[in-house]
């Protein structure tokens, strides 16, 4: 049997215990104290084997960077392992959704997205050290504190690290219960459309009013028409607001519109369409703000090369890896957009990210851990 796989199997109970410890250290986005506590926990775990640095993340808490000491002399180039410390679950979620092991799975807030990925990586590093497998590249782990809300505060740090790396391995969960790797992700953006009209009494002075709500409704109809499913381009007016009372012609209304694109050039096209919106009712005015946040992670030659390497390594572990494309974004979108070969979805295999049934498969812990070790040693 493959040595990394044998190692991971022998450590499976320890890996489960670490995942439990990470899940039970709740770390919701924007709760800096909680996130810092989680960062301290991970930093303590690696302090003997890595140089640890933290970077200010403002109200999100600190971002973590760890440079590992791994076997093999004369490092050439770098591999960046990328993850995030934040979760979508508020502190106290454990009371109703405690960590538990049942039905061949581990359950709990953040277990899939993405605390198991962090645990796999730490044991992959341990495997390389204990088995004395030479790693020809320097290896850095970066955990961002604000991934779940778009990574505004960590983006520059991620891009800076990626530019100095030959490859990026993203520890986000795989796709579905097969744990497919992610070789393409849609680009993600948000537009804010604000409509200003003219208030009036709906009974006394109806004609003097210009309804911002009516205008918004017409604009939404137009914007919905920007969707082009064939090109994988979607716009979703997910939030609307407006008006004050039913007997007042609304002076203000607004919408938040999520957009997803497969190709970067579609984002530019879409942006022109948003900026060109004109009011149907000339007495109303429109303001458009926002735009693309994460560029698409396109399936470039570098991405394909990394995936093929991973597939070949996984075969030695008895696993047939598949690839997938997802509409969700990750920090891998930023690194791939810089042209750095990026492979995503190397973390937990399970389902229910951001949902009450969030869980990972216990019998995929060992092969995932071994795969990460083999990638670090083999690319
Ligand atoms: Zn995630």
Image (cartoon, rainbow, N blue to C red):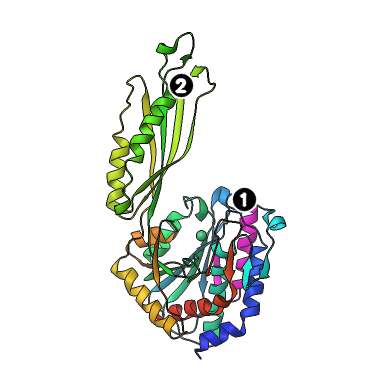
Can you give x and y, in whole percent of width and height, for residue 150 in the image?
47, 51
> Quarter-wise, where is residue 86 in the image?
bottom right
Q: Is residue 159 above or below residue 214?
A: below
> Quarter-wise, where is residue 138 in the image?
bottom left
Question: What range of the chain is rendered magenta?
Answer: 32-53
Mark 1: few, some, or many residues within 10 Å (few <14, many ≥20)? some
The residue drawn where x is 35% and y is 56% is 296
The residue where tag 1 is placed is 31
The residue furthest bottom is: 1
Can you give x and y, in whole percent of width and height, for residue 121 in the image?
53, 73
Magenta residues, dominant SS class: helix
Q: Which labelled disc corresponds to residue 251? A: 2
Q: Earlier in the sequence, mark 2 or mark 1?
A: 1
Can you give x and y, in whole percent of width and height, for residue 102 in the image?
67, 70
As rendered, which of 171 and 46 lies closer to the eye?
171
Q: Quadrant of the C terminus?
A: bottom left
As rendered, which of 205 and 282 lies closer to the eye?
205
Mark 2: few, some, or many residues within 10 Å (few <14, many ≥20)? many
Label 2 SS: loop
Q: Is residue 8 at all visible to an observer of this figure?
A: yes
Residue 234 belongs to the span the image colors magenta: no
The residue drawn where x is 39% and y is 37% is 289
As rendered, which of 213 and 127 lies closer to the eye?
213
As rendered, which of 268 and 59 lies closer to the eye?
268
Q: Is residue 44 at all visible to an observer of this figure?
A: no
The residue drawn where x is 68% and y is 58% is 97
Label 1 SS: loop
- Give left or right: position of 170 versus 278: right
* Mark 2 → mark 1, Cα distance in angstroms: 36 Å
């Amino acid at each position: 049997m493959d040595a990394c796989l044998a190692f991971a199997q022998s450590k499976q109970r320890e890996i489960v215990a670490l995942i439990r410890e990470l899940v039970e250290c709740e770390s919701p986005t924007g709760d800096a104290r909680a996130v810092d506590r989680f960062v301290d926990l991970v930093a303590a775990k690696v302090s003997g084997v890595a140089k640890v640095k933290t970077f200010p993340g403002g109200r999100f808490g600190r971002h973590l960077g760890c440079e590992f000491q791994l076997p093999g002399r004369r490092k050439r180039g770098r591999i960046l392992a990328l993850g995030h410390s934040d979760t979508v679950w508020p502190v106290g979620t454990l009371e109703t959704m405690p960590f538990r092991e049942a039905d061949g799975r581990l359950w709990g807030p953040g277990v899939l997205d993405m605390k198991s990925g962090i645990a796999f990586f730490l044991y992959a590093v341990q495997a390389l050290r204990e088995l004395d497998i030479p790693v020809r590249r320097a290896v850095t782990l970066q955990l961002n504190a604000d991934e779940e809300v778009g990574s505004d505060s960590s983006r520059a740090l991620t891009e800076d690290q990626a530019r100095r790396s030959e490859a990026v391995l993203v520890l986000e969960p795989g796709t579905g219960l097969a744990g497919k790797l992610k070789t393409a992700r849609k680009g993600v953006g948000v537009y804010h459309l604000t409509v200003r009209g003219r208030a009036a009494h709906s009974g006394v002075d109806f004609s003097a009013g210009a309804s911002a709500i009516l205008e918004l409704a017409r604009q939404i109809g137009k914007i919905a028409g920007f969707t082009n499913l064939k090109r994988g381009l979607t716009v979703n007016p997910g939030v609307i607001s407006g008006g004050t009372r039913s007997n007042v012609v609304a002076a203000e209304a607004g919408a938040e519109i999520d957009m997803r694109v497969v190709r970067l050039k579609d984002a530019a096209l879409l942006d022109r369409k948003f900026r060109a919106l004109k009011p149907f009712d000339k007495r109303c005015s429109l303001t458009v703000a926002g735009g693309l946040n994460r560029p698409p992670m396109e399936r470039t030659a570098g991405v394909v090369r990394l995936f093929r390497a991973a597939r070949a390594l996984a075969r030695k572990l008895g696993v047939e890896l598949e690839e997938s494309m997802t509409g969700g974004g990750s920090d891998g979108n930023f690194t791939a957009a810089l042209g750095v070969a990026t492979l995503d979805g190397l973390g937990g295999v399970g389902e229910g990210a951001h949902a009450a049934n969030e869980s990972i498969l216990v019998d995929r812990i060992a092969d995932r851990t071994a795969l990460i070790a083999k990638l670090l040693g083999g690319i």
